[in-house]
Structure formats: structure tokens, C-alpha cells
Amino acid sequence: MSSRIECQPCFILHRRNFRNTSLIVEVFSANHGRVAMVSRGARRPKSRMNALLQVFQPLLISWTGRGELQTLTNVEAAEFVKPLAGSSYASAYYLTELIFRLLKPADIHEALFTSYAQALTALRDAGSDSQVAETSLRLFEKQLLQELGYGLVLDHDVNTGEAIKDDSCYYYVPEHGPVACDSESIPSGPKLSGRSLIALANEELTDKDSLRDCKRLMRTVLQGYIGDKPLQSRMLYNRRSLIEPQ
């Protein structure tokens, strides 16, 4: 039986041309997760759909259908926001690519949808402040892992059970957790300070050392779930000669 969904808060994750005049779009919706749909005639000269169906823009989308590919019936701008450009655009593209690669179709994650919207707002507001931008990336990555069931252990040494000490150093073993640097064997994983682990746990990344540590941590952990296929957003940074955020 066909279903009809009306005016759902959404973001476009990806779009591609389909046949002569249509688009296939992958959307991230607050209440239905990832949904693939076709927008028929969206590329016709007089269609309003093509201009509206843009990444990073908060939208209200309606669709109908059954199966894996739905039919988009209407789209409206939820609000008008300024376009992202430069490093902010590439950072937002990175977050979008993470969702597209890691979130399964129809998996509903309302909290993650909210975090994504907040991260986009933070990137728009950050301007040239790279520390604010990187903080928003790290916090979104943390939320993403938590929502997907891969939440990080940040409060204790997984070998001893002792609370993380801010003046100690640790190796973070992927899919396991932090292990003190003075353990008998040297574990595999990035080395970082207890102060950085505590800062990430408290979502208070206020210094460059913690941001640097957490960037290496997130890159290592996420790589295990993303796989070997390169992220397109990293290539975008290379092409634009920008500082890579992830």
C-alpha cells in the first residue's frame, strides 16, 4: 500500500540527474531517516524544484510511494539561510557524507537530525574561526557514533576501570576504549591526553591541543566504519587547497 508523507523537515544529502528532466535525491528526514525519492521534471526550465533541492538547506518535503524509491510531490524552504562557502562548505559536505555513508535507509535518528542542523548553523556562524568550526565537527562525530551504537568510552581506562586522569596519557583502542600509556604492551590506536578525553566527554573543546587529539581520535575510529573507500569531501579540500577538518 502506498503511503503519503506531508511537510517533513529534511535536508538533501545527495542528488543526481535522472533521465531527461528529473532528479533522484537522497534526503535525511527528522521522522523517517534516509529516504531516496525521484523529483519528476525538476530539471525543466520552469520548475521551482531544482533551485530548492539544494544541500545544507532546511526544507519541508512531501512524498508518496512504496518500496525503496519514493516520489517527491512538493518541497518548500523551511527557512532562508545564507549559503555555505569555502571551508564551511567543505566541512558541511564532510558531515553530510558521513550520514550518507553510515546511516542505513529508513533508520530514524531524530537526535542526530537535530545535531546535524545545529552543526550546519555553527558552521555558518563560525565564519573564519577555525576552532569553532572544528569543535562543531568533533561534537557531531561524537553524536553520530553514539546514535549508531558505536559510542566512545571517554570516562575510564577500559583495562583497569579507573577514571580518566587529566594529567595522564592514553592510547585509544578502536572498538575498545582508552588504555593508559604505561600499560605493559603498547596498544594500537591514537595517543592522546586524559585532558582531551575529558574535554570531549564534557563537550568542552576549548583548546587547540584537545581539538588536535580529538581529530586524530575521530579519524581513526570512523575509518573502521567507513571502510577503505575515500571520502569525497577530503578530495574537495585537496582541490580547494583548504585545511582539512576531519
Image (cartoon, grey):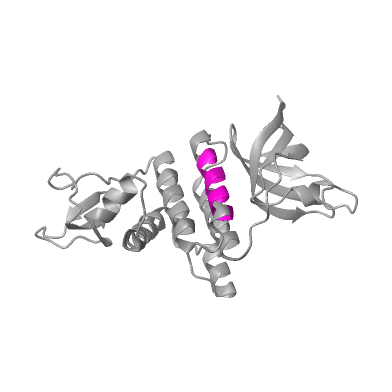
Q: Residue at x 26, y 60 (%)?
A: 192
Outermost residue on the left side: it is 184
Instruction: Specify whether 139 is left or right of 162.
Output: right
Considering the image in quadrants, where does the C terminus appear?
bottom left
Instruction: Specify whether 195 is left or right of 31.
Output: left
Residue closest to the eye, 25 or 160: 160
Instruction: Specify whether 44 is left or right of 198.
Output: right
Is residue 7 covered in magenta? no
Outermost residue on the right side: it is 46
Provide residue 33's location: percent of width, then percent of height: 57, 37
**Within the image, what quadrant is residue 97 found in?**
bottom right
Q: Residue at x 67, y 33 (%)?
A: 8
Q: Residue at x 66, y 52 (%)?
A: 55
Task: Tally the numbered discs.
Answer: 0
Considering the image in quadrants, where does the N terminus appear?
top right
Q: Residue at x 27, y 46 (%)?
A: 154
Provide residue 233's location: percent of width, then percent of height: 55, 63
Would residue 67 be visible to someone looking at this image?
A: no
Provide residue 66's location: percent of width, then percent of height: 69, 32
**Within the image, what quadrant is residue 162 found in?**
top left
Q: Is residue 146 above or below residue 4?
A: below
Instruction: Specify whether 50 is left or right of 59.
Output: right
Q: Is residue 29 above or below residue 25?
A: above
Residue range highlighted in magenta: 113-124
